[in-house]
Image: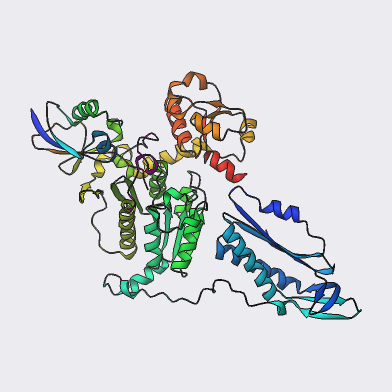
Amino acid sequence: MSRFDLSGETVDIAALRASLQSSGSGGFCTFEGWVRDSNDGRDVDGLDYEAYDALARAEGERILQEAIARYGVDDVRCVHRVGQLHVGDLAVWIGVAAAHRDEAFRACRYVIDEIKHRLPIWKKEHYLDGDTAWVACTHEHEHARHDSPPAPFTPDYSRQTRLKEVGEAGQAKLGAARVLVIGAGGLGCPVLSYLAGAGVGTLGIIDGDRLEASNLHRQTMYDARDVGAFKARLAAKRIAALNPTVAVQTWTEPLHAGNATEVFAQFDLVVECTDDMGSRYLSNDAALLAGKPLILASVHQYEGQLQVVSARPGASCLRCLWPHEPAPGLAGSCAESGVLGPVPGVLGALQAAEALKILLDIPRQDDGVLLLYNLLDHTSQRLSIDPASGCAAHGGCVEVARRAMARAQNLSLSFNQLDDAIAAGFTLVDVREPREIALEPLDAPSRQCPSSQVGDRLAELAGDRVLLVCASGRRSDYAARVLREKGLGDVHSLAGGVNALNRSA
Amino acid sequence: MITVTLQYFAQLREQAGAGGERLTTTAGSLGDLYDELRARHGFSLPADALKVAVNTQFSDWGRPLCDGDTIVFIPPVAGG
């Protein structure tokens, strides 16, 4: 879809504005250029705009793309009029939607300045005295005082290429490497920063969350003014500033069983940095099925755990240690248990170091260990995992992963709206807590049963086609698994939960 | 009676209110020991949600205790 348009007709401002409305945008800025009644001291009656159509459209599109990349705004539209216009008519309309006003204002200013400067559009002014004159639009351009465009940058990796284990050959390996980082939070910030700084050629970033003020004590890539914006986009912007030679791909929705293996297959290595137990198990299974090494870490208050799943035959995995995902709430989270900011910083730095060692083929210790770090007393333990005692008894890690993935694919279903689920014959069961439901009720008839209680209320749910719904899909996934294990066959979970419904709306 | 050294991680450390302790017990296996500790400290996690290691080696719950063992209970943690 093109964001830029040239139009011979009156501009439909309401439609343009509506096309930019999104629940994630908190600031909207427009600029309108009008035909005025004088220019250079001469009275103007009206004017004709003439454009080199194809070039103007292509260049206009480029300018809008630049504004999005440069200021991280959510979306931009622009229409420039061509043809005959009278005094007071709208000549150009620009609208910018963004998380916050500042980037909306700045992007809007950028677009109008660049359009005036770069678009091949000319105007013929009609003066009241009957005379006419062609005026180049660009002559009005006052050289804009944007942030100066990025100067050509040549990275200097000499401090790492000096290491004999790295060298130019190692640097070339990093430049060709593709690393996927899941979660751009406390662990993800150091991972992304170090990998971008080291010159890893392509970084994928997956994070469905928006930045909150409570993240800032440990998520060091972000600024206070970024609160409310998607972390994946903020991280991409930060990486572009840190090392513009790194290519970045972003996902602002979490992976699910339907796409995780496919996405993993596009990368050489995956670093799991979420605070979500479900994501950790999904990543473990997808890494094994795609045959990609995975670096897991997680933190709790003052301590952390690190595990490398090499995905090689005979190696161990997350399920070798803890075969099943624990119930939500049992594993703790930064929000519930608290965490000292530097703790994920240390564990994330360890993940980055492991990632670089793997990419550079630097000799490493055996992968079959769980590392425990305690930052209160500086103790660490390396606990060897015996692969024979884990998944090996159940067909091996890959087979266990394949079964878990198949179960997960069958369990969660995507719907754009709840009415579609009802039309498909589902009874909706809202498994959120009553206070959450009060804040954001579902816009479709549903029963209510908190996720912790579903196991005790089997009788009420038996016999129906049930779709469980929670905020993110985590609790409903878990509750659906519990119900299936108790014998209910037709129980599903809404993939991505209410958050996904909001995104698709 | 056997005396062992216990180390707690993450939620267990929080719920026990200490990073570890020395304990004299009659528990026959790691599983029995955890049941005893769970009753005493009110640990929320069931044994099957944990890993246990003895003298820095992961172990199964049926292993008998030996005098002087260092036993570590490790829950999965989710923070990031």
Q: Is residue A450 above or below residue A355?
A: above
Task: Point out residue A349 in the picture as x, y percentages from the top left corner.
Answer: 32, 58
State whether residue A73 appears in this view.
no
B19 sits left or right of A195 in the view: left
A42 sits left or right of A145 in the view: right
In the rendered image, the quadrant that contains the C terminus of chain A is top right
The answer to which of A271 and A51 lies nearer the viewer is A51
* Residue under the image location 89 percent in, 81 percent down: A131
Task: Point out residue A427 in the picture as x, y percentages from the top left corner.
Answer: 58, 27
* Residue under the image location 49 percent in, 35 percent down: A411
User: Number of marks in the image?
Assistant: 0
State whether residue A390 appears in this view.
yes
Residues in magenta? A324-341
B14 sits left or right of A22 in the view: left
Most extreme residue toward the top, as rendered? Answer: A459
Task: Point out residue A364 in the picture as x, y percentages from the top left corner.
Answer: 25, 59
Secondary structure mainly formed by the magenta segment: loop
Q: Is residue A328 above or below residue B1?
A: below
